[in-house]
Image (spheres, rainbow, N blue to C red):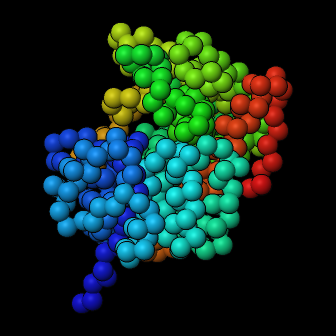
Amino acid sequence: MNRKMPLKAVVVGLHIHAGSLHPDKNHGLLKSFEAQEDVEIVAYCESSPDQAEALDEIRHVDPEARIYTDLDNLMTNEDFDFAVIMLPPNEATPAALRLAESGKHLFIEKQAARTAADMRELCDVVANKKLVTQVGYPWPHHPVPIEMKRLIDAGAIGRLVDMEARLVTVQVKPGLREPDFWMYRSESEGGGILHMEGGHWLTLFRFFSNTEVKSVTALCGRGIGYIEEGLEDVATVALEFDNGVHACLHMGYLLSGAGPRNDTYFGLRGTLGAATWQPTGEGNFTLNSIAPGWETAPERQFSMKIAERPVYADQWGFEFVAEFVRAIRQGDKTTVSIHDAYRMMQIIDASYASSRTGRRIELNSSLG
């Protein structure tokens, strides 16, 4: 029997959720791709002096892989099918564009760009060359959203009317999140808490609403005050979707460091009921309903098993990566393509425009 050769991959950048190849350290995306049976990582590229120790560890754990500190050299000397990009947004976009122009499929850990305008040329190249892309917003593969959506599509809460999400986490402040780190700088990241983390929740909103955002109204502020001036450490965003569904997203680098590091919530409300989930810890959620079939137990608790795996985001994170690999082989769509990420970035950009101007910002539902 003829067996297909594994897809050859290169890793460009070791930032964000790269993690480590060491079996007992940081279960990140390096292990997610190493664990794919249909993938062989042939080379790594990282130019930042800050990542020298990480490169040394890769040399030790994976001595057969080639190591580069320059993307030009990697592209000249390596034959590969796709690239995994884990760079700050200002570096990720030009690297992704060069790789896409050479016909390489792309997995890009968030964020793929500082702004939607920066991403537009990359979207065009990907479309013209018919490349497979996946951007790192994996929540739709989590067992809880999958089961919640199954119940909602079956009519458990009636017609969806409203969605709400919250992520409040530790402050950008010396000793906690260092203000000079690239994630909290305009030049490298492009925005504050909404830019860094908002795409995850916007992805879930689109997953459940099955439609696009029509308009955005937002307030962004610098309430703690250590993050770079012009960026936000607190944001509240109101969204209207094309089908009339409303959503509210509240985010903040606001916690002092005492107690839990994250305060999270996700809720869906419909004409016949509501579902709520705290997206940390166990896979538990609650659904209340007056829909037919729910009369004897109108409030139900669900507990979804979160299968463990020593990769980024356990088994469900592994499956998000596996979907990308299958799509290259089979020509399938991915959950979060570069065009989906572009839409998320348009929403974030519109939020900033709304906060600056005090106006409600209308979005065109077409990719433009």
Q: Residue at x 65, y 18 (%)?
A: 221
Measured along the vertical axis of the image, is residue 20 above or below residue 187?
below
69, 193: nearer the viewer: 69
Left or right of 264 in this view: 228? right
> In this rendering, is residue 32 above or below 328?
above
Position of residue 41 measured from the top left corner of the image (x, y, whole percent): 30, 65
Residue 291 rendering spot, x and y as whole percentages: 59, 34
- Is 50 placed above or below 91 here? above
Give the tally of numbered discs.
0
Q: Residue at x 61, y 43 (%)?
A: 114
Residue 118: image x %, image y %?
A: 66, 50
Of 348 and 280, nearer the camera is: 348
Q: Position of 23 compared to 342: left or right?
A: left
Note whether residue 119 is visible.
Answer: yes
The N terminus: image quadrant:
bottom left
Q: Nearer the viewer, residue 52 or 365?
A: 52
**Quadrant the C terminus occupies:** bottom right
Identify the residue at horizontal 46%, vertical 66% (top origin): 72
Q: Is residue 159 visible?
A: no
